[in-house]
Amino acid sequence: MRTSDLPEALFVTGFTGTVGVRYMVATDGRVPICEVTRSSGNAAVDDTTCRLIRERFRFRPSRDGRGRPVRSWIVENHTWEVEADSVDVVETPRKRRVRIW
């Protein structure tokens, strides 16, 4: 995720916030579902974070005891820091993967 992905208005006003998300990694490694579990306080940032996760994130799927791919859920936080008139964003994920059988 890059600064240029965020709404332009944030570059004028600045923004700092953490978006909590939960998303599914399908057996093909793509992310079909993303949910905001904790808002950053800015709906546009929340929506953009989940949209980017669905569009860009790719994983090697989890595997069951027989080595077959299985879907799994990842729970993490993404912290965005945008200073007014700046182009720097710090994104710090915390991940916890939960396997669904």
Image (cartoon, rainbow, N blue to C red):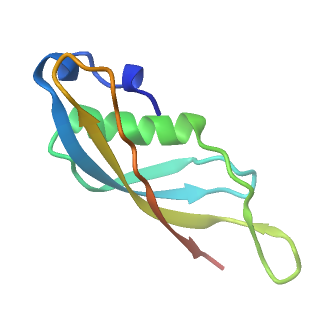
Q: Quadrant of residue 62?
A: bottom right
Please name whichever residue, 14 or 50, is drawn nearer the observer in this view of the structure.
14
Q: Residue furthest right?
A: 66
The picture places residue 71, in percent across and down from the top left corner, at: 66, 65
Instruction: Please report the residue visible at 78 percent of the width from the left and 78 percent of the height from the top.
Output: 64
Please name whichever residue, 88 or 17, is drawn nearer the observer in this view of the structure.
88
Q: Is residue 93 above or below residue 73?
A: above
Please name whichever residue, 33 or 46, is drawn nearer the observer in this view of the structure.
46
How many numbered circles are shown?
A: 0
Q: Residue furthest bottom?
A: 65
In the rendered structure, the answer to whether residue 30 lies left or right of residue 19 reads right
The picture places residue 56, in percent across and down from the top left corner, at: 58, 35
Please name whichever residue, 19 or 85, is drawn nearer the observer in this view of the structure.
85
Q: Quadrant of the C terminus?
A: bottom right
Instruction: Please report the residue visible at 19 percent of the width from the left and 40 percent of the height from the top.
Output: 16
In the rendered structure, the answer to whether residue 4 lies left or right of residue 66 reads left
Q: Is residue 95 above or below residue 90?
A: below
The picture places residue 27, in percent across and down from the top left corner, at: 73, 58
Q: Is residue 19 above or below residue 62?
A: above
Instruction: Please report the residue visible at 29 percent of the width from the left and 50 percent of the height from the top.
Output: 19
The picture places residue 63, in percent across and down from the top left corner, at: 78, 72
Instruction: Please report the residue visible at 54 percent of the width from the left and 65 percent of the height from the top.
Output: 73
